[in-house]
Image (cartoon, grey):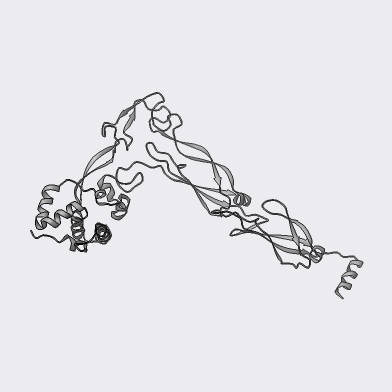
Amino acid sequence: MANKDYYAILGVSKSASQDEIKAAFRKKAMEHHPDRGGNAEKFKEMNEAYQALGDAKTRAQYDQYGSSFEQMRRQGYQGAGFDPREMGFDINDLSDLFGGFGDIFGFGGGGGGRGHGHAKRGRDIEVAIEIPFEDAVHGGTREIEIEKVNSCARCGGNGAEPGSGFKNCATCGGTGKISKVVNSFFGTMQTAVVCSSCHGIGKYPEKECGACHGKGVSRGKRVLKVKIPAGIEDGGTIRFSGEGEAVRGGQSGDLYLHVRIKPSKEFERQDHDIWSKAVISFKTAALGGVVDVPTVDGPKELKIPSGTQSGTILKLKGLGVPYLKGTGRGDQHIEIHIKVPEHLSRQQKKMLEDWEG
C-alpha cells in the first residue's frame, strides 16, 4: 500500500507547527464535513491524517517509519479510541465544529442537547403582564400567579416519601450512565450516555412520595414575586432563570416575562425622555414666574421665562426614564400652552389696547 502524504492531505508543510496543523484540520473539517455538504471520503481521509499528525508522538512515528506507519497504526491503535483532548482540542469547539460529535467521545453537552439520552430540562414558560407607566419608569416588584409543573413540596423533588431511602438503578448500577459503542469516521469508539431507564438519576425511591407518586413534580398554581427593572421598555422581556417548569432529575426551565406598559394620560415616552404639556396663564407667559408641573416623581417647580410663547419647550433635567443598562436618567420636556382669557372687563380690554399701541 502506497504511503499517504498526510501533510499534503491537510495542506501543510512538514515543518508546520502543531498549532498550524490543528488550524488546518479545523478549516478542512468545516469544509468537508458531510453534514455541511462535503465529501465523506475526504472527510474520513482528513481525520486519518490528523490522527497521525495532530499528536506529536504519532507524528514522530509517521515521520520516522513512513510507509510502515499505516500498518503499525492499524495493528497498534485499531479500536483504541481517539481522544481529541490529547491533541489540544477544546471539547466545546469540537461540538460546534461537528454538530454534536462531542457526544461520540463521551463528553457531550448537558440537558436539552441534540444527542439521544441527555438529562431532561424543564419547559420554558412565557407570561405577559401589563404595568402602569410609572412602574416602567421606577421599576418595582409584582406578584404573578402562574400554573405550571413545580417540584413536589412534600419530597423536595426527589420522588421519595420523606424518611425513606433509595435503591440503585439496575440498568446503570446507580451511575446514571451506560457505555455505548459508536462507529464514526474516527473508527470504533466507546462513550457514555445517560441511562434511559432512570434518565440519569441513577436511583429509584424505595417508597414513592404519596403526593407526587414518585414523579418528583406536580402541576399547580404558584405565586411568584418578580422584579421589574427601572426603565424597561414596552414589549421588553425579562428572563428569570429556573422559574419555568420543573423536571425530576433535571434542570428547571426559565420564565420569560413579556412586559406591556399602559399608556399614560399625562406623559409620553420617547427613548429615555418624557414629554408632557403644561397650561400657563397669559400673565405668567408675559411676565414670567414659577408653576408646578406634574412629573413621574410628583409635582415639580418649573421656571417660566418672561415672554414665553405658546409651543415653547422647556426642560426639567434628570426627570426622564432611567437607563436600563448604566446610570442616570433622561429629561422631561414640557410643551407650554398659554390659556387666553375668554372674558375680559372693559378695563382689561383698554389696558391691552393701550399695550398694543
For the C terminus, the image quarter is bottom right
347 or 274, nearer to the observer: 274
In this picture, residue 356 sits left or right of residue 68: right
For the N terminus, the image quarter is bottom left
In this picture, residue 313 sits left or right of residue 25: right
143 or 108, nearer to the observer: 108
Q: Which residue lies furthest to the bottom in this view?
A: 357
Residue 185 shows in the view: no
The percent coordinates of residue 231 (x first, y second) are: 58, 53
Quarter assignment of residue 7: bottom left
Query: Does 214 appear above or below 112?
Result: above
Query: Does 273 appear above or below 309?
Result: above
34 or 67, nearer to the observer: 67
Count of numbered labels shown in the rendering = 0
The percent coordinates of residue 113 (x first, y second) are: 34, 47
The percent coordinates of residue 103 (x first, y second) are: 28, 47
Residue, x 90% and y 65% (percent of image)?
A: 345
The percent coordinates of residue 256 (x first, y second) are: 48, 48
Residue 204 shows in the view: yes
Quarter assignment of residue 310: bottom right
